[in-house]
Amino acid sequence: MVMWMRPYILPAALLVMCALPVAAQLEDADATTQSKCNEYLKTSLPPESRQVTVVTKWPDCNSYKFYSGLGTKVDFAAARKCAWAERLATQAELEPRYTVASVLGGSAMLATLYANGEGVERNIPLALRFACEEGWAPAEFSARIEHLESMQKSAGADAKFSYCDDITSGAMEGYCAAYFRELADQDRAKTLDAIPERFTPAQRDAFSELVLAQQAYALAHGNGEIGSSGTARSMYAIDAEQTLRGDFLAAVQSFEAGHYPGGSPASFAEADARLNLAYKKAVAYAEAHKADNGAVQPDGIRDAERAWLKYRDAWVAFAKLRYPAVLAEAWLTLLSKDRTSILDGSFCDMDAIANGDKRCAHQGDTYKPRPLP
């Protein structure tokens, strides 16, 4: 039975898999898709394909970053130039392992650019050729070809194609989740960078420490408190991490708007006692089931708890400077309750979730922790 950490989500480390030849993936597709691709693979390549320098190692560029504006400006021409080199490197089996760059780059990126007409004239037949080169799971392989064919028939200029549109495999869910995490992290960083504009220097320094502590906690949570069975484990771990980071930003924005938590020494003592009990139960359960396939390990919970304690203390230190009128116990109560919501009744198997076990759906949400108020 697959065991999952209750209410929520995914590891910051993406699943690393051995590369499979594209030909083997095409052979695994249904007969109709194979027949179509045998024709689409005959589509002539544009003249620029012959201008690509022969590669002897994986390219230093990342076409998906140019395409999405990750750490740079959006540049479709640069993305296409890089993708041609990535395509050759893939064909030469130069990538040491699958990464977001190799999965969403190369032929996948060329398919995207030509399908959407981004930086180049739209050419669906050519996009179909590249999609046939790329492969992946048989079901999504077929769905992707059908998706592009439907674009060709409709000829809608507004239609957009993404390689993450038609995924069916847990592995691709993980790679796409990692890609979306990069996008979300970049957008969230811009918002977080703007928040301290009116802070004093001391408040700004404390906030920087808090952000780093929160990121470390979210990462430890995703890596250590999410079940690791199944091909979609990377997606769940990344989702878990992203949920905590998103909750943190929402909380800061709420507090900056003047919505402060309430609490007292008595409320903190009660919340702390409940948290300690939930923590002991979670560790005990993990110890008893640590040999199960994909089970959350006790050390993963301990590492996340230590990271959470540093995060909690950083919150209190920052709040003392930024919100001096709010009692420290109010923050401690709030944060303890939030951590308890993650640990309390946290290990649920999928049968229990499917059967509506209320312990597995804290506050009505089965897959994510209660957002930090």
Image: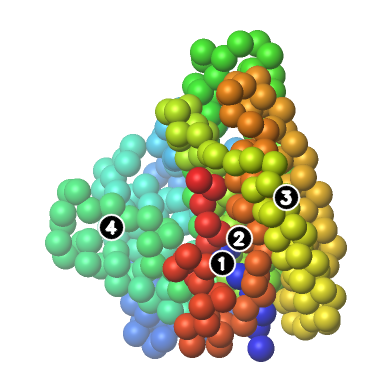
Q: Which residue does the image show at 51% across and 78% down from the upper left?
A: 358
**Label pair 2/1, CB-CB below 8 angstroms:** yes
Farthest residue, direction front: 266
Relative to 362, residue 340 above or below: above
- Which residue is disc 4 drawn over? 124
The earlier-in-sequence mark between 4 and 1 is 1
Q: Sort mark 1 into few (<14), some (14-19) or many (20+) by Cα contacts within 10 Å.
A: many
Question: Amino acid type of disc 1?
Answer: Pro
- Position of residue 122 in the picture relative to residue 366 (left or right): left
Residue mark closest to the camera, 4 vs 1: 1
Place of residue 109 in the rendered image (x, y in percent of width and height, measured from the top left): 45, 51
Q: Quote the CA–CA distance across marks 1 and 3.
A: 25 Å
Q: Can you tell which mark lies on residue 7?
A: 1
Q: Quote the CA–CA distance across marks 3 and 2.
A: 16 Å
> 167 or 29, which lies in front?
167
Residue mark closest to the camera, 2 vs 1: 2
Question: Amino acid type of disc 4?
Answer: Ile
- Which residue is disc 3 drawn over? 269
Place of residue 156 in the rendered image (x, y in percent of width and height, measured from the top left): 16, 54
Question: Amino acid type of disc 3?
Answer: Ala
Relative to 2, residue 7 above or below: above
- Position of residue 243 in the picture relative to residue 265 (left or right): left
**Label pair 4/3, CB-CB below 8 angstroms:** no
Place of residue 133 in the rendered image (x, y in percent of width and height, measured from the top left): 47, 65
Question: Amino acid type of disc 2?
Answer: Ser
